[in-house]
Image (cartoon, rainbow, N blue to C red):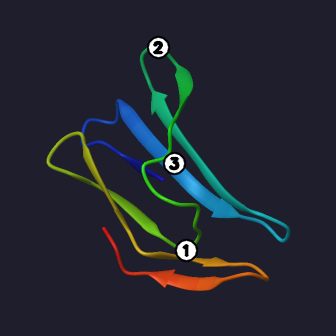
Amino acid sequence: MAADTDGTIAVMHGGGNSSAIFRDFWVYYSSPDRWEQKVAPVEKRYGHAISCRKGKKFLLFGGHVSSPEVSRFYGDT
């Protein structure tokens, strides 16, 4: 999860628990106080990082996906 430089927008993507890896993508707006689900810009993953750059631009880097069918580390941005 990362917030913009003035704290008015935050984004959250993916993650996982013991039974699933998530692809959901959420944006939080502090005014009004609400969450909005968006179409995920990348594949499902966990262990990635998100940071805010230059105001309201967000950068997502890396992550991992692991299931019985595939195990992949991402090095993308």
Residue on which the image places disc 1: 47
Q: Left of 1 or right of it: where is 65?
A: right
Picture residue at 52% right of the left edge, 60% below the top? 43
The residue lying furthest to the front in this view is 69
Identity, as a three-letter code, of the amino acid under mark 3: Met
User: If you read the primary sequence from the N terminus, does the residue marked by circle 2 or circle 3 appear first?
Assistant: 3
Tag 1, which secondary structure?
loop
Question: Callout 3: 10 Å neighbours few (<14), some, many (20+)?
Answer: some
Mark seen at residue 12: 3
Q: Indicate the position of residue 12 as horizontal and vertical percent values.
A: 51, 48
User: If you read the primary sequence from the N terminus, does the residue marked by circle 3 or circle 1 appear first?
Assistant: 3
User: If you read the primary sequence from the N terminus, does the residue marked by circle 2 or circle 1 appear first?
Assistant: 2
Picture residue at 48% right of the left edge, 32% below the top? 28
Residue on which the image places disc 2: 32
Q: Do the CB atoms of the residues marked 2 and 3 lie less than 8 Å apart?
A: no
Q: Indicate the position of residue 10 as horizontal and vertical percent values.
A: 42, 40
Q: Left of 6 or right of it: where is 2?
A: right
Could you give the CA–CA distance between mark 2 and mark 1, rounded to whole angstroms?
A: 30 Å
